[in-house]
Amino acid sequence: MTAKNELRLGVNIDHVATVREARGSAYPDPIRAAKIAEAAGADGITAHLREDRRHISDSDIERLSRELRIPLNLEMAATDEMLEIALRAKPHAACIVPEKREERTTEGGIDAAGQHNRLAPLVRQLSAARIRVSMFIEPDKSQLDAAKALGAPVVELHTGAYCDASGAEQARLLQKLRDGAAYGASLGLEIHAGHGLTYDNVRPVAAIPQIRELNIGHFLIGEAIFIGLENSIGHMRALMDEARRPNRLAAK
């Protein structure tokens, strides 16, 4: 269990499976990566089962559900197929994300406000199965209000725009994340964040006191090519912990 001021790290293993699928072979095994991540200090594992199965497979989800000792967060599109898989696999959490087949990676948050009627039954059924529901959204009040109205206990704020920006624009987007995290927490939502985070940009996000978890994948897997997965996760963990030290938070 993490202490009150500590920040959980969820490691996304999708792109271990991407490398595997590039050759259509049995390796590298994303479940092996998940177990290494667990040993290196990850608090949870995230895997996105896409409709086109471009990386993570159904059997990966089955094995992760069966073999992990830390929580599994299943990222899923708001479809009947993915709902059925989630209800069968029973992950600790399910994060509902937007999905387009032509995108390279998830582009922006889901429109929780505009898709209420579509999302409400999914949230209801997942919650009834004791799967903790998270909504991957932009840090906007309307989306946070919508997530609360849907009954999702958790939101994951999309950090991609902040990570892609620089200078004054990045500072503006960081403040938007801060404001969104504070507002969401005031509604009683648990706040997570993720997408595009690296060693260079993680500390300001990790320092936001309302954020309880960061989900990071692509950068950690890429960095592992050069320094190993244990080291890439260990360094990220250290940067996150440094950002959450009480004296650093007090200086903000």
Image (cartoon, grey):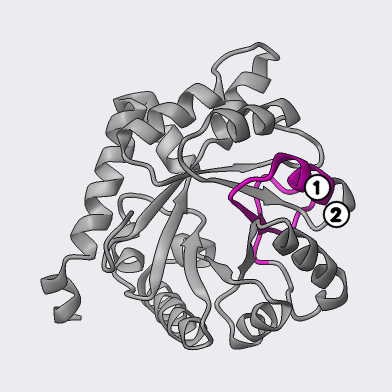
Magenta span has 47?
no
The answer to which of 112 and 172 lies nearer the viewer is 112
Residue 101 in percent (x, y) is at 81, 46
The residue sitting at 77% across, 53% down in the picture is 77
Residue 41 in percent (x, y) is at 32, 40
Q: Is residue 135 above or below residue 172?
A: above
Residue 131 sits in quarter: bottom right
Distance between mark 2 and mark 1 Cα atoms? 5 Å
The residue sitting at 61% across, 27% down in the picture is 17
> Which quarter of the rendered picture does the C terminus lie within?
bottom left
The residue sitting at 24% across, 53% down in the picture is 239
Q: Which residue is mark 2?
A: 79
Name the residue type under label 2.
Thr
Residue 82's mark?
A: 1
Is residue 224 toward the left or the right of residue 90 in the image? Answer: left
Name the residue type under label 1.
Met
Q: Is residue 130 above or below residue 154?
A: above
Magenta span has 106?
yes
Magenta segment boundaries in residue numbering? 82-109
Circles 2 and 1: CB atoms closer than 8 Å: yes
The residue sitting at 75% across, 66% down in the picture is 123
Residue 47's mark?
A: none
